[in-house]
Image (cartoon, coloured by chain):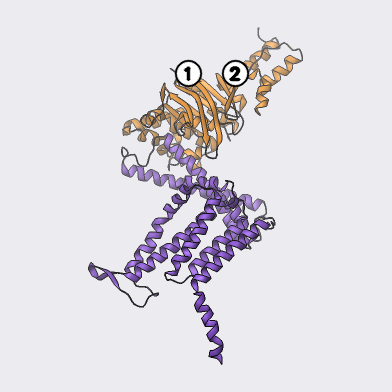
Chain colours: A orange, B purple
Amino acid sequence: MHIIETQDLCHTYKGNIDALKNISFIAPRNTRIAIIGPNGAGKSTLFKHFNGVLRPTSGKVLIRGEPITKENIREVRRTVGLVFQNPDDQIFSPTVEQDVAFGPINMGLDEEAVKHRVSEALRTVGLSEYRTRVPHHLSGGEKKRVAIAGIIAMEPQVLVLDEPTAGLDPQGVREIIRVIRDFSVRYGMTVIFSTHNISLVAELAEYIYVMNNGSFVAKGTVAEIFSQPDLLSSVRLDLPILPKLISSLRSQGIAIDMGYTYQEAETAFLKAFGKIA
Amino acid sequence: MIEDLFDLEQVTSQKSVIHSLDARVKIIVCCAAIVALVAVPYSPVVYIVSTVFFLLFLLLWALSKISPVIYFRRLLLALPFGFMLCGFQIFFKNRYYTDYHSLLELPLGIHIYYESVEFASILLVKFLVCYSFIVLLSSTSSLQDLLEAAGRLKVPPELILALGMMIRYLFVFGIIYRKVTDALKTRLFDPFDHRLPYRYRIVNMGYMMGSLFIRSLEQGERTYASMLCRGYGRDSYIFIKEKPLLRSDLMFLGLCLILIIMVSLLCWYDPFSLICRFEVLPSYQG
């Protein structure tokens, strides 16, 4: 039984706009999945289905094998936490602490449990010192981390992040990468994220779904997807800079191993230059 | 309620003879019907004029091919105001009648008068027919078309610019509101969830409205700054290009105006009394 599964999921918005067409998706436990695709591909719509914010026009969304119903919607939202692309859509309380406590209070937890969860969530995202700060005075990266803390305080088993690095500076991106990796490695969470930052996909994802016009056009491991540059360019995406450079060198006859992450590429270059065996 | 904002656009984007008319024509016909009906003096003649106007409305609605359900839904939204406006009238005397006959005597010296009931029913009929024409106008023309039409009808550019921005940001607000409510749902907040303390729900709804206010303020500042960057000033206006009226638009406008003017004139003045008056006048002068 997969933690999230969709079967032939279709969603049509008012005005007969087909946002999702026969989406079949599987998210096993403790995996990191990237969903990539151009703007308007249907990624955000799909994420809203995982959390029961939208209802399918046809097809099924199964959370831990159960379809989403009115009766289990609260349980679904405890299981699957959704972090919105724009943190301003999510953060509304006067202080960081109150905003992070919002979800746990709605779950009906007692005060002690809420306090504990807030402290843990803020510590995990590295914002323990910001408890009493006013959210709209924070930077974009800090707001993003508050938004994530607000969701992980509910201790979901799946964390869904819509464009987690959109609008962040390089330092902000690095912090988000660290936080996301921690969720998966340290807490065993399933992480599903969408992004246009292809380098982030190589660094974080174990499995990739490529989306275009409301359908999946490809799925596979990082190596399987990034070995198809034509597929990526057909959906207005590009290879990350390092594998692109290595491909170019290989096509010019230089013997070098392929590397998708920074670390893999560094090892490949050192090996090619004879610095390591 | 805010979701209705998006439905409005969906209905106006349908295809029909009425939808394809120039928005100026629809504005003029709608205003003419309202002015003509409002101008008919308070007397039972209003019922006849209203019936003819309502038949005209029904014909135009049928031609627009929009579901009657949409009309009834929009009518339902306004009915409480209409009933409130007219309902109170039955208890009061008004300046349109000299003699009053009590229909019902209530405690505390309150009376329901026959004449007041008649006045209230006339008011309600006028309200319903006028509102129906507004529903027709707003269901067959997009807000942007109405704005451009108002500009072409020489409504002051300052007003057009302000209205244009209001329309744009009404939708921005709608989208932001939708996102915020979705974000609240994902964190299990429901203002009608009785498991949560009443005060907590009220406080959080207050926070949500406060955050919407702050975001509106910030958005306003950003938009104003970007307007200034593009040379916004006292003499700025929205560019609206010239658009001549088609022959079909003019024909429709002519037919509707003739009908509206003729019906109200014929019902307003008894044609026989008009003829008599013209006959009497020369002999009186002599």
Between residues A4 and A78, which one lies in front from this camera angle?
Answer: A4
* Chain letter behind tag 2: A
Give the crowd class for mark 2: few <14, some 14-19, many >=20 residues within 10 Å: many
The disc at residue B76 is none
Kindly report which numbered mark, 1 or 2, lies closer to the viewer in this rendering.
Answer: 1
Between residues B142 and B118, which one lies in front from this camera angle?
Answer: B118
Q: What amino acid is labelled 2 in the image?
A: Val
Disc 1/disc 2 C-alpha distance (Å): 16 Å
Q: Compared to B17, does A190 lie above or below?
A: above
Check disc 1 and report its element: helix, strand or loop: loop
As drawn, is B164 to the left or to the right of B192?
right
* Chain letter behind tag 1: A
Between residues A204 and A6, which one lies in front from this camera angle?
Answer: A6
Q: Where does label 1 land, which residue? A: A28
Give the crowd class for mark 1: few <14, some 14-19, many >=20 residues within 10 Å: some
- Identify the residue at image location x=67%, y=12%: A257
Which percent across, then down, holds residue B235? 66, 61
Q: What amino acid is labelled 1 in the image?
A: Pro
The disc at residue A222 is 2
Task: Name the residue furthest left.
Answer: B107
Which percent across, then down, holds residue A270? 67, 13
Q: Compared to B68, does A151 lie above or below?
A: above
Is residue A89 in view? yes
Q: Compared to B175, does B270 lie above or below?
A: below
Between residues B181 and B33, which one lies in front from this camera angle?
Answer: B33
The answer to whether mark 1 and mark 2 are in CB contact below 8 A is no
